[in-house]
Amino acid sequence: MENSHGYNILTVGVGGQGVISCTQILASAALADKNEVRTAETHGMAQRGGTVIGYLRFGSNVKGPLIHKADIMLSFELSEALRNIKYADKNTSLFVSSDVIIPPSVYTYRIPYPEQEKTLEYLRKVTKYVHLIDAREMAEKAGNAKTSNVILIGVMLGAGKLPIKEESLKSAIAKFVPAKAKEVNEVAFKMGYELGQKIKEEFYE
């Protein structure tokens, strides 16, 4: 599934949520599909809950990794979606985990943490394609809370917004997760994919 135009995925979250491993899985799968792939990452106190951003661009003629507007923004934490909304426009699909991790700035500078409904309302002013996913709860049902990133990858594919082959994604997941976690990640991927199919029916068909 070679992508003739550059496709841009921005993955955001905080340290310890698996932002970079998620970007690596997606990049590996895109490479397996014979795309040119460019990635970059930024860390802000990653080990202390600071912002982490993964940039991924792939296609047949991709020159650099930095993204101006994302086709997909994948956010592991609600406030990080708000913080990085400048990368989105009306055509961006925004997949957001409902996970809440209070960033250090809330304590350090006494900045109020944004309310969920107000945050979603603001995000939907930018793009109507805002999908809030309880990835942690789904991951726990799958058998391991650490499979949240695989849940979200499955959701994006099921929604029809990820131009990468399913086999390539499954192979990349198997390569990057521990061997003992292979089965639980397969369950998580399937759960995410099924939810993505429902999102596709509601928003994209």
Image (cartoon, grey):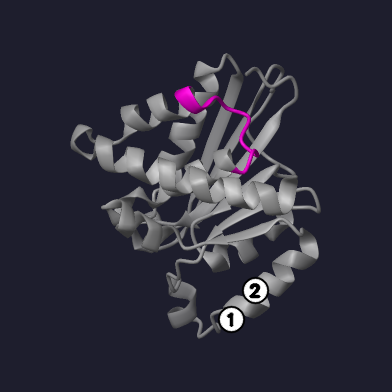
Question: What residue is shown with label 1?
Answer: 115
Instruction: Write the start and end of the magenta stretch as one range.
Output: 159-167
Q: Which mark is residue 46?
A: none
- Helix, strand or loop status at disc 2: helix
Sort mark 1 into few (<14), some (14-19) or many (20+) by Cα contacts within 10 Å: few
Rendered view: 76 above or below 22: below
**Is 123 on the left or on the right of 44, as rendered?**
right
**Is 156 on the left or on the right of 45, as rendered?**
right
In front: 28, or 14? 28
Q: Are marks 1 and 2 in contact (CB under 8 Å)?
A: yes
Question: What residue is shown with label 2?
Answer: 119
Q: Amino acid at mark 1?
A: Glu
Quadrant in which the C terminus appears = top right
Dominant secondary structure of the residues highlighted in magenta in the image:
loop
C-alpha distance separating marks 1 and 2: 6 Å
Q: Measured from the top left, where is residue 3 in percent x and y?
A: 68, 22
Rendered view: 10 above or below 172: below
Sort mark 2 into few (<14), some (14-19) or many (20+) by Cα contacts within 10 Å: some
Rendered view: 92 above or below 84: above
Q: Measured from the top left, where is residue 125 in percent x and y?
A: 79, 67
Q: Is residue 45 visible?
A: no
Quadrant in which the N terminus appears = top right
- Helix, strand or loop status at disc 1: loop
Residue drawn at x 47%, y 47% as measured from the top left: 192
Q: Measured from the top left, where is residue 16 in percent x and y?
A: 35, 55
